[in-house]
Image (tube, coloured by chain):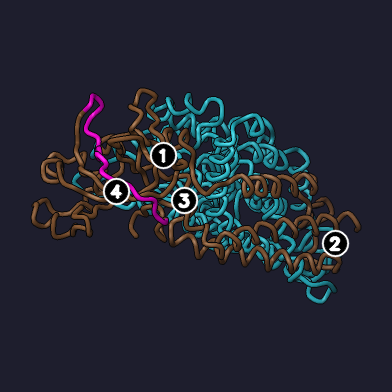
Chain colours: A brown, B cyan
Amino acid sequence: MKSMVLSRSLQALALILWGAVLVYFHTSGRLVKYLAPDFRVIAFLGGLGLVVVGLFCLLTAREYATCGHQHGPEDTHDHESLDIHPIGAFLILVAPLLLATGWTKDSYSLAALTRKGLDDTAAESGIFLASTLPPLTKEIIERQHPPDENGYRQFPLLELFFSSADPEMRGLVGGMQVVTEGRLIRDPDPHAPANQRRLYRLFITCCAADSRPIPIIARFKDAPPEVEDNTWIRLSGTIGYPDEGEGHHAVLEVDFAKVTDPPVEESFMRGF
Amino acid sequence: MLWAVSADSRQDFAFAFLSILFEGAPFILLGTLISGFIDIYLPSNTMDRMLPRRTLPAILVAGLLGGILPVCECAVVPVIRRLVKKGLPVSCALTYMLAAPIVNPITALSTWKAFKGPIVALGEWGTASASVVMTVSRLGLGFLVAVAVGLIVSKIPLRKLLKPKLVESVEAEGKATASAKDCGHDHEHGEACCGHDHGHSHEGEGGSRMVAAFRSAMRDFTDVGVYFTIGVAITALFNTGIAPGAEWLDTLAEGQVAGPAALMALAFVLSLCSTSDAFIAATLHKFTWGAKLAFLTFGPMMDVKLLFLYQTVLRRRTIVLLAIGLFLGIGAAAIGWQAAISAMNPPLSAP
């Protein structure tokens, strides 16, 4: 009986911990970096549910309960035995979760981003987004992208990235003075010039694990700003789409840069 | 492994690990709550009563019963063991065992959610949401494979399929049922005084069934959560390129045969729950839709943990033959399915 109570208590604590982590990430606002919008409410409700079920089972751990049906003479199954020892199960459930919670910085490193496609061109990306591109006339493009106070037209990074795969867009947007924002990170190409960086945002389908970077190349006239990888930055400059041997990349020749606050939705989401 | 790698790799692992875990945990909770309450509140002969008497209709219905009795693959084995003992035809029991983890509303919902967003090109028919394509294909293939296994099993003698002890138990139950007609009590209701299970509930025995149901759900969550955590950790290691062999696995991704085979092998090793495996499949973006379909259909029917669970019911030889048959059958179906998709419109069918 004592070992059964211990087993129930450990399982209940594991559930409460899982639930608490989910609720914490939601209430702290960090969950937006992990999940697409419609999963966030589900995760929050799931977290609450885990806490409630865990608390209920913890508070009733000593209570006698019956399943209400007879087990046959050779049917030794019960409704509580685990596949593995309860302490082992508890450690497997809890240890990776706590370690990951301690280790995460809510973002990927340069190596992981490179693996996920930081140096891919839009043509290689395999993401079907043609429908998100605006109609192809210069007037409409200019109307949709009003200039900021410095005269640079405001473009989402996503549009600059995908326009590099479209010859007509390259012709219309190439040479335009634009301003865009994203996360600045070192260039994964070891042969890249010292003044070159990547500006990217993640594109999430469901969660961060299935995310893909949406990058453009940022080339600075002088030394790039001394900021940590993944710093949010607003870059103003002239966009071009040169083919330097690996297909057309969107390259922003930067006139000036300004560190900025991250937007509410740091990643692009499909369908939102 | 993770202590030996850089802080950047730990950060990457943690980010991917948490995102998949956050996505899947609520669906595991939903599934285990339902299975916990079924475990305690649903009499085990409910399913037996639902099945037609003729073999083919009974197998077809058994393949769809997961729709109203949704259980994952971990929970289904004890259930069918119990049902076989009570005289449910083995062909129906195995059909239900293979189909229920896939052909059920929770798995359908999680698959639909996991693949929400991407588009699958269907040639002249236009395009369709990957949610719809993958959910329908998964449930359809799972049902067909389970029914095919049920039909094959219906032609094989019981002794060649089941563990000897279980066969004896089935035969003893049959004799007891026959003699019960003369034993002076009613087997359609009443007490468990005769030494075998009447498969019905006994109210008022003391103790809370609600507590028992929540404990059963918690047990299921813990069991599934353990495998899920291990699976998510391995997936996160491959997803972020930390795991040795991640690059090699990538090279298999585009292979028409190697891709589905690799993902079925991965599903076998990961032993994920069918209620949450779609969230992992959705992150394997280098693989084809067909390979993902193989992963999602084979995994709930055969994996490492099921090998152990099946041994409580089936002979080892049966399990080995079942594993080989499922691998080849599902692999062939997935390859054919991908070939059909690719033939419709190759440039737009990239995952």
- Residue B351 lies, with reference to residue B225, above or below; the image says above
Q: Which mark is residue B194?
A: 2
Report the magenta residues as a range.
A244-261
Say if the magenta span includes residue A253: yes
- Mark 2 or 1, which is nearer the eye? 1
Q: Amino acid at mark 4?
A: Leu
CA–CA distance in space, label 4 to label 1:
14 Å
Of mark 1 and mark 3, the one earlier in the sequence is: 1
What distance separates the C-alpha of mark 2 from that of mark 3?
Answer: 55 Å
Q: Nearer the viewer, residue A243 or A232?
A: A232
Callout 1: chain:
A
Give x and y (percent) for residue B279: 49, 48
Q: Secondary structure at mark 2?
A: loop
Q: How many marks?
A: 4
| Residue B3 in which image quadrant | top right
Q: Which residue is mark 4?
A: A157
